[in-house]
């Protein structure tokens, strides 16, 4: 009887050890470290006309992960490592757009904010002239092609207290204007100067560029500035005025 009990105890002990070994050999599966990122884009010409949404390249900055949009503007980036991600949007004829700080931390990520992206401006500024009045300043920009009611051209003004003002070096910038006459007159008064951050007596330099309705502009945290990818670099020299 005693020997039977010992045999039973031995078998139970062996079974327990075997089960323990089996559990140790089958640990929980590792958590995923990557998943897909998907989204959509809406593509336009340099005006307000929506065009084919296909063939825009969307890529993860700093990696080889990329995808192109389909006719509906949809894209899917496969197996993107978890972490904050910057996406770069590129297509021939379009200024490069970037979307920073996309949180991609747990499973597939769908970008709900669908950017509207436009083609680069084909508008050149051929002449820029300043005239002053009593408490006012007018900046007249001549465009090529000629702006008229049947051919709206979009333009944007940049301001600085430095003579090398540009779309990359500026203290203040205005929203794009739809020009339907050439020259297009921008009229500035005391409220305008205050809104731009300039004071009476300051010398201010202004430069104008052709722009697109959808400018593809974005905030670059590394450069600490707003980037305007669609402006046309063909532009008249900057002009200056003294704030009244």
Image (cartoon, grey):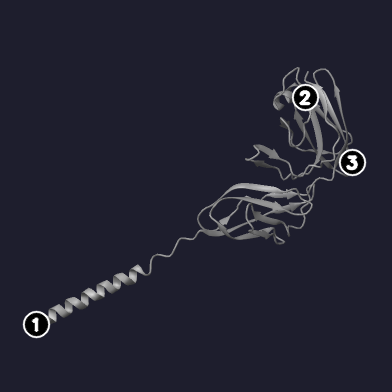
Q: Secondary structure at mark 1?
A: loop
Count neighbours of disc 3 (C-alpha within 10 A) and say few if under 14, some if 14 to 19, many if 20 or more: some
Give whichever of discs 2 and 1 has the lower sequence position: 1
Instruction: State the residue position of label 3.
Output: 144
Instruction: Verify CB contact (< 8 Å) between mark 1 and mark 3.
Output: no
Corner quadrant of residue 40: bottom right
Residue picked out by circle 1: 1
* Of residues 65 and 98, the one drawn nearer to the viewer in this rendering: 65
Is residue 16 shown left or right of residue 44? left
Identified at 68% across, 38% down, the residue is 226
State the residue at coordinates (72%, 61%).
71
Q: Position of residue 56 (x, y in %)?
A: 72, 56
Instruction: Look at the numbered disc 2 and give the secondary structure of its residue.
Output: strand
Residue located at (70% from left, 62% from top)? 70
* Identity of the residue drawn at 78% across and 49% down: 119
Q: Looking at the rendering, in which quadrant would you find the N terminus?
A: bottom left
Query: Between residues 221 and 152, which one lies in front from this camera angle?
Result: 221
Proximity of marks 2 and 1: CB atoms separated by less than 8 Å: no
Q: Is residue 165 above or below residue 82?
A: above
Say few, some or many: other residues with alpha carbon within 10 Å of mark 1 (under 14 / 14 to 19 / 20 or more).
few
- When asked about the image quadrant of residue 27, the answer is bottom left
Q: What residue did someone put label 2 on?
A: 204
What crowding class fits label 2: few (fewer than 14 Cα within 10 Å), some (14-19), or many (20 or more)?
many
Please state which of the two labelled residues, at mark 2 or mark 1, is closer to the viewer: 1
Q: CA distance from mark 1 to mark 3?
A: 109 Å
Of the residues under marks 2 and 3, which one precedes in the sequence?
3
Q: Residue 170 vs residue 128: left or right?
A: left
Between marks 2 and 1, how big is the CA–CA gap?
108 Å
Marks 2/3: CA–CA distance = 25 Å
- The circle drawn on residue 124 is none
């Amino acid at each position: 009887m005693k020997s039977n009990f010992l045999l039973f105890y031995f078998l139970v002990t062996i079974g327990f050890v075997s089960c323990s070994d089996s559990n140790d050999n089958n640990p929980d599966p590792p958590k995923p470290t990557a998943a897909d990122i998907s989204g959509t884009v809406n593509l336009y010409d340099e005006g307000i006309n929506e065009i084919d949404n296909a063939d825009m390249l969307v890529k993860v900055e700093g990696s080889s992960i990329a995808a192109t949009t389909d006719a509906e503007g949809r894209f899917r980036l496969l197996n993107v490592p978890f972490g904050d991600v910057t996406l770069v949007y590129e297509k021939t004829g379009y200024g490069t757009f970037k979307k920073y700080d996309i949180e991609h931390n747990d499973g597939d990520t769908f970008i709900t904010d669908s950017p509207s992206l436009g083609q680069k401006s084909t508008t050149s500024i051929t002449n820029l002239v300043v005239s002053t009045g009593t408490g006012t300043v007018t900046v007249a920009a001549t465009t090529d092609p000629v702006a008229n009611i049947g051919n709206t051209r979009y333009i944007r003004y940049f301001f600085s207290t430095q003579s090398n003002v540009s779309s990359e070096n500026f203290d203040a910038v205005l929203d794009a204007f739809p020009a339907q006459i050439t020259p297009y007159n921008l009229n500035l008064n005391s409220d305008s100067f205050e809104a731009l951050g300039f004071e009476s007596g300051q010398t201010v330099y202004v430069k104008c560029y052709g722009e697109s309705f959808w400018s593809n502009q974005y905030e670059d945290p590394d450069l600490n500035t707003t980037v305007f990818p669609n402006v046309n670099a063909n532009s008249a020299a900057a002009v200056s005025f003294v704030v009244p």
